Amino acid sequence: MKLLKLDVSVSTLICCLMILLLLPIQAQKNLEIFENYNDCAAIFYKGKMLVNEYSPKGKCKLETGMEGKLTVSAVSLSDKGAIPTTKIGFQVAIQNNRTNTLRLISQDELFEVELKTILEQCEKGDELIFLTTDKKYSLPHHRVAVIDGC
């Protein structure tokens, strides 16, 4: 049996020790990533979810004659439907249908927005994009089709 002679320098040993010491810190950071986007949220119109179904197939659209305010809330999903629990902050952008350009409507964090304020800036076929301001919330149905524009 032949023994291998290892020639390991002090700097190599220090490097290995540092890596072993930093692994738990990196593992903790990786776990924090999975803490993001865990709470469900939805866009609400007059106390009801705007999305037609809370599933990957769900769609949001604004129909002619809709007036009032839109909000974004955390939701509690049950057999009886979705119940808004906590209003959460958001921003709104308009995606122009002709140019595919995104334009942020307000730099401020909103907790509700008047439909009239948004619709007077839209064209037929535009989409509204709702952006949450807290990575805690998942808002899978963030696109809202504007059927008739202004």
Image (cartoon, grey):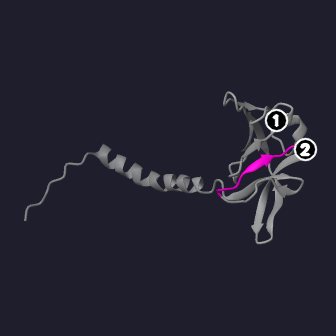
- Circle count: 2
Q: Is residue 105 above or below residue 7?
A: above
Instruction: Tell me residue 133's x, y (percent).
Output: 73, 44
**Residue 126, position in %: x, y?**
74, 36
Residue ID at (88%, 41%): 115
Spatial CA distance of label 1 from label 2 is: 11 Å
Judge from the rendering whether residue 15 lies leftward or rightward of residue 9; answer left or right. Answer: right
* Residue at 24%, 48% in the rendered image: 8
- Residue at the limit of the structure toward the bottom, as seen here: 79
Are dots 1 and 2 in contact, CB under 8 Å? no
Kind of residue at badge 1: Gly
Is residue 108 in the magenta section?
no
* Location of mark 1 (residue): 149
Provide the residue span drawn in magenta. Answer: 56-68
Label 1's element? loop
CA neighbours of label 2 inside 10 A, class few (<14), some (14 to 19), many (20+) = few
Seen from the viewer's position, the closer of residues 21 and 145 is 145
Judged by its main secondary structure, the magenta piece is loop
Q: Which mark is residue 106?
A: none
Amino acid identity at mark 2: Gly
Residue 62, percent from left and from top: 81, 45
Pointer 2: what residue? 65
Residue at image coords 82%, 35%: 149
Q: Identify the residue at horizontal 66%, vertical 58% (top origin).
A: 38
Quadrant assignment for the N terminus: bottom left
Is residue 62 highlighted in magenta?
yes
Circle 2: element type: loop
User: Is residue 1 shown above or below 10?
Assistant: below
